[in-house]
Structures are given as C-alpha cells and as structure tokens.
Image (cartoon, rainbow, N blue to C red):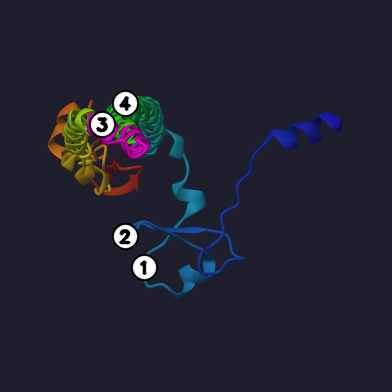
Amino acid sequence: MWWLNQRKKKIRKTVYYCDVHPTEHFKYYCPNHDTLHCGDCAASSSCKMNKLCSISREIRNNAEFKELQSNIVQLMKSADALESKVNTIKESAVKQGSRHLDLVERLEQGLIEKIKAHSASLKDDINIATSEAKYQLDSVIDTCTDIKSSGEQLSNDLKDSNGNDSEVFIAFVKAKPVLKSKTDELNAAGKRANPKQYIFKKCVDLDTMLQTTKSFGTYEAENEEIQSSQSTGRPDIQSTNIHQHTEATGYYIYMSP
C-alpha cells in the first residue's frame, strides 16, 4: 500500500472555509451577488442559492473559467516582463550612479591638483618676495655696520694726533670726504630700509564656492517630461469586457463576466 500513500502525498487538495463561519465549508453559490456561502449563510439569506455540486459540473470547460486561466497566465507574463524591465533599469541606475561618482571623484581630484599647483605658485612668490626683502634689509644692516666701523676709525684718527696741530689738521682734512661719503651711503641705505609690502588676496569666486553647501554642483532628477520621452513603455495586458479589476504592480487585469 506504500504506492497509494505516495500517490496521496502528490495530490494537492485545497479546502475552502466560509469567511463568516470559519468551521463550515462552502456549499452554495449566489448568482445575483457572485458570492460563495456555507449552509448557515444560505439558511439566513433571502437570495436564491445554487448548490456547488450542481453548478460546478463541467466548470473546466466553461468559457469564463478558461478566460480566467488565460488572464492569470497573462498576469504572470506581465509580472515577468515588468520584473525583467525593472532589473534592467536597476542595473542601468547602478551603472549611472557609478559613472556620476567617478565624475565627481575626477572633479574633486582635478580641483585638488589645481589648488595644489596654485598654492605652490603662491608659496614660491611669497618665498621669493621674502628672500628679496631679507637680502635688501641685510644689505642695509651691512652698510650700517660698515659706517659705524668707519666712523669709529675716523674718531680714533682724530684722537691719535697727540696734540700735534699739523697731524690734527691732516686727520681733519682726510675725515671730511670720508664723512661725506659715509653720510651719502647712510642716506642711500635709509631709502633701502623700506622694502615692498605685500598683501594676500583670496579669490572671491573660490571663497564664494567654499561657502556654498553645493560647491561642486547638485544632483537632481531630470525633468519628468524628459524621462517620459526616454521611457521604453510598459508591457501591455490584453483585456476583454470590463467586469472587475485588481491592481498588480501598477497594471490592471480585466475579467469579463
């Protein structure tokens, strides 16, 4: 008897119970309302009921039954077509996102490289200007050191005359042109004591960009009309006379009475 038990396992049997009386099976059909009822429902209803065992004969050859089966098949085909289309759109969306991320990354790297290059140029300019100012001021300091040394030498020459008027006179005569020369050098050095002054000016456009929350740009949805024109359309579902419809993933299934 094992083969009989195996056969029973393969047979799928669905038992339908009444929605109002969950312990009762459906036994009647109301043609006026197109509804199923158990014995308790039929007893309390004023509608004329048909027994299921009578009206269900040859149901598999019924045109509406076959149409329902066809609509179910069409529903699954439409769902499969939509799933395939959505998977394609999903793959395209992921690729598009990757391309846009790459564009932003390249933009970021390009800006960083340009900023670094411009920063390096600014640093060179600052270093050159600083070196020039330092060299100029160092030359003034060297001149002042030399003048002080010359002045000290002149003072010593005048003091070392030992009271000899002739030697004092000679030191005096020699000191006058040296003094004049060193005075001119000091005046010239004084003019070099004021090197060029520099200021750093930030780029107004860059400052404005950095103060903006969307420095690189924005990421926005395309115009709906553009998206509609680019759409490949949705899979159609063939319909017959409209009796009732159910919504399934955005598409409507129609079944005739």
Is there CB contact under 8 Å for labels 4 and 2? no
**View extreme (bottom): residue:** 44
Q: Distance from label 2 to label 1 (Cα)?
A: 8 Å
Is there CB contact under 8 Å for labels 2 and 1? yes
Give residue 78's quadrant in the image.
top left
Q: Distance from label 3 to label 2 (Cα)?
A: 152 Å
Residue 163 in magenta stretch: yes
The spot of residue 74 in percent (x, y) is: 36, 31
* Amino acid type at mark 2: Asn
Query: In the rendered image, which residue does mark 1 sit on?
Result: 47
Q: Distance from label 1 to label 4 (Cα)?
A: 99 Å
Q: Is residue 94 left or right of residue 41?
A: left
- Give the numbered dot on residue 32: 2
Q: Earlier in the sequence, mark 2 or mark 1?
A: 2
The spot of residue 168 in percent (x, y) is: 27, 35
Q: Secondary structure at mark 2?
A: loop
Neighbours of disc 2 within 10 Å: few (<14), some (14-19), many (20+): few
Neighbours of disc 1 within 10 Å: few (<14), some (14-19), many (20+): few
Q: Nearer the viewer, mark 3 or mark 1?
A: 3
Query: In the rendered image, which residue does mark 3 sit on?
Result: 166
The spot of residue 103 in percent (x, y) is: 32, 26
Q: Earlier in the sequence, mark 3 or mark 2?
A: 2
Query: In the rendered image, which residue does mark 4 sit on?
Result: 124
Give residue 165's quadrant in the image.
top left
* Amino acid type at mark 3: Ser
Residue at image position (28%, 48%) is 213
* Amino acid type at mark 1: Cys
Q: Which residues are magenta?
A: 148-171
Q: Earlier in the sequence, mark 3 or mark 4?
A: 4
